Image: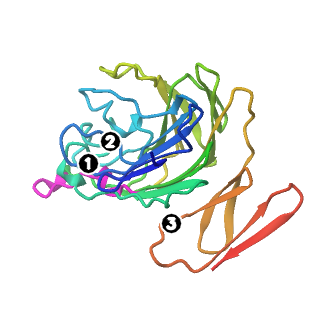
Amino acid sequence: MPLAFQDVPFGHIVDRTDWTTNAAQFDFLANWISINHQQGAAGQFEFYRKGEWLTKQLDNYDDNLNGQSSRWHNMLSLQNWCAAGDRPWVSTSSCSSMAANTCSANLPAIPSPSPPDSNYTYACADLTPLFNYPDVWEPQIATVDIQQATRNILWIKPDHIVVYDRAASVHSGLFKQFNLNLVAIPSVSGHTVTERTASGQQLLVQTILPTNAIAAYVPVNSITTISQEEPSVGRVIIEDTNDPVSIRFLHVLQGADSNATQDAVVHVASTGGNAFEGATVRGVAVMFPVDVLSNNFTSLTYLVRWDHQSLYRRSFA
C-alpha cells in the first residue's frame, strides 16, 4: 500500500514511514465545518510511533460542546468577542472553539501538502473563517473578532514535527491558546513538556514562541462521554497570559525512545528580505513566513550556526 494518503475534499493527510511495527505516522486535518455533529478539529495533527499514539485528538461525544471544541483536538483555542456579551455555545469565553454546528463555516480550509517525500511532509491551512460566527439577521450577536488563525506544519521524518501558528483578534484581552493532547501525564519545566508513555517512549515538546509562554496541564475530567479505548488523559495548554491582539506560536515536537535525550533547538529569524522565522533541529533549518504570503515573496536571508563555532549566511530570492 502507498505510505501517503490525501483526501483533498476533506483536507486530510495521512503519511507514514513504512509498514513495520516500528513505523512512525503523521496525520493532519483541515476540513470544512458546517453540519451537525462535526467537532472543532480543523487544523489538528496527530503522531503515532512504534505502536503507540504520542499525541492525538480526544475521541469523545460530549453534550455541552466542551469535548467538541478545538481544545481537545490539538488545535488553537481563540476567544472571540460578542457585542451582546458571552455566547459560550459558539466561541466566546467558555468554548473558545471553532463555530461548530453553524452555517458560518462553509468555506473550506484547504491544506497545501508537499508531494510524497521520504524526508518530510508539509501542510498549511487558513482556518480563520471557522472561528467566526456572522449573523446577518441579528448582527449584534455575531462573533467575528478573529482576524487570523493559520497553521503551517512540517513533519521531518521520522521523529520531528515543527508547528507554526498565527492568531490575531480585533479586541485585546482575548486569550489565544495552543493545545496538545497527551496519552500520559507530562512533566512541565519552563518551555519544555515531556511525556513518557506506558512503554517508555517519549514525546518532547519545546516551545520557542511566544518567548514568555506559560504551560499548564489539564486532565480529562470535564468530558461526559469518552470513547472506549481512548488513550488520551489530558492536554497541555500553552499561552501568553498577557492575551495580546496578535501572537505567533512556534513548537518543535520530538518522538524518542526511552533512553534518548532532547535534541537542541535554536530559534532562527530572517536578517533580510521578507520576514521569516523558524528553528534548527538535527541539522535542518525550518523557516515560515511571519505573515501569510500570497505572491509577494522577494528574498530571504538568515544566519544559522551548525557547529557551535561558525555562522553560516543563507540567502534565497
- Tell me the number on the disc at residue 291: 3
Residue placed at 37% from the left, 45% from the top?
79
- State the image coordinates of residue 224 (x, y, percent, origin top left): 30, 20
Extent of the magenta region: 126-140
Mark 2 is surrounded, within 10 Å at the Cα level, by few (under 14), some (14 to 19) or many (20 or more) other residues, namely many
Q: Amino acid at mark 3?
A: Asp
**Residue 67 at x, y = what percent?**
33, 30
**For mark 3, does the 10 Å Cα neighbourhood hold few (<14), some (14 to 19), or many (20 or more) residues?**
few
For the residue pair 41 and 147, the one nearer the viewer reads as 41
Mark 2 lies on residue: 40
Gap between marks 2 and 3 measured at Cα: 24 Å
Please report whichever mark, 1 or 3, sits nearer to the chain's N-terminal start.
1
Q: Residue furthest right?
A: 309
Asked whether the viewer can see residue 57, the reply is yes
The residue at 47%/66% (across/down) is 292
Query: Which residue is denoted by mark 1 in the rendering?
Result: 33
Outermost residue to the front: 1
